[in-house]
Image (spheres, grey):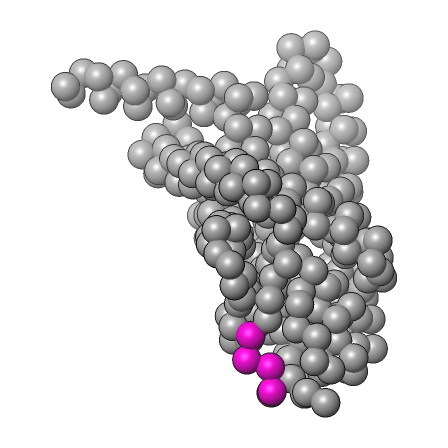
Amino acid sequence: MLNFTDVTEFILLGLTGHLEWQVVFFIIFLVVYIVTMVGNIGMIILIKVSPQLNSPMYFFLSHLSFVDVCFSSNVTPKMLENLLSETKTISYAGCLVQCFFFIALVHVEIFILAVMAFDRYMAIGNPLLYGSKMSRVVCIRLISFPYIYGFLTSLAATLWTYGLYFCGKIEINHFYCADPPLIKMACAGTFVKEYTMIILAGINFTYSLTVVTISYVFILIAILRVHSAEGRRKAFSTCGSHLTAVIIFYGTLIFMYLRRPTEESMEQGKMVAVFYTTVIPMLNPMIYSLRNKDVKEAVNRVISRACLTK
């Protein structure tokens, strides 16, 4: 019988075993990864160089883009490598590192989305006090919590993953080292890991989603108090992008992690995981730019300055 210290590497089964589909997936996900990097890094640079985007909302958005860059880079490069590789392996240490950063970044992102919801409430519910209440110091404190809490939570969760034992089977039915397939594959030490995963995910998703929900309840109340139709439309438009991102991200994560790992849920989970590890990081810059007048104007000014300097 093998224990966890005997395992030196895992085999990632990936999305498909068909060679022709692997080439197609490689091309698709390479394009998606490039677009994700360009979109999110471009958003970060745009916020840094544009004075009109110097507000708490865009400060938090730049951190969301940074987390999306890290989130996608934690999974996609290894997935692309394995799509063209015959061995499709990941080292035991590499698996733990991937697990650690994945769990950490998921928690950082959900709490950044919660902080952004609170920021929208402050902007719409208390516009006259917004500048003083959401000072630079307050924003830094608010953004520090997701990083600190996310990485501490991930450290505990990864240590529980380290406590899993395997009985010879080292094939992970996934394209990255995820908790559900590792639990399904393990032969001992699964009880603590499985239930702590569900409990932690449930508590953290519920807590962050509660902050988002309460913020939007107060936002709705504040909007209903606005007398002009134009004022209401503008208030709704500032929240639409964030609300879209929240629904997509939370929906996919809840579907993935608030269920016990089964063979059927593993296959469904792989499809959902493709969405939130590759597609959502690519969509976020589009969601926040296509529906945002300030971002569009900032892009046009940057392009105009670039053209004038030539």
Return the x and y of residue 249 as percentages of the image width and height.
68, 42
Task: Report whether 9 appears left or right of 259.
Answer: left
What residue appears at the point 18 percent right and 16 percent down from the top-left corner?
Answer: 308
- Residue 169, placed above or below residue 16: below
Q: Is residue 90 visible?
A: yes
Return the x and y of residue 168 as percentages of the image width and height.
70, 80
Q: Which residues are magenta?
A: 5-9
Return the x and y of residue 261 as percentages of the image width and height.
82, 62
Q: Quadrant of the N terminus?
A: bottom right
Q: Quadrant of the C terminus?
A: top left
Task: Report whether 249 appears left or right of 151.
Answer: right
What residue appears at the point 35 percent right and 38 percent down from the top-left corner?
Answer: 45
Q: How many tags in the picture?
A: 0
Q: Residue furthest left?
A: 310
What residue appears at the point 60 percent right and 87 percent down from the top-left corner?
Answer: 5
What residue appears at the point 65 percent right and 41 percent down from the top-left corner?
Answer: 275
Q: Is residue 51 visible?
A: no
- Residue 194, placed above or below residue 205: below
Determine if the magenta segment contains residue 8: yes
Determine if the magenta segment contains residue 31: no
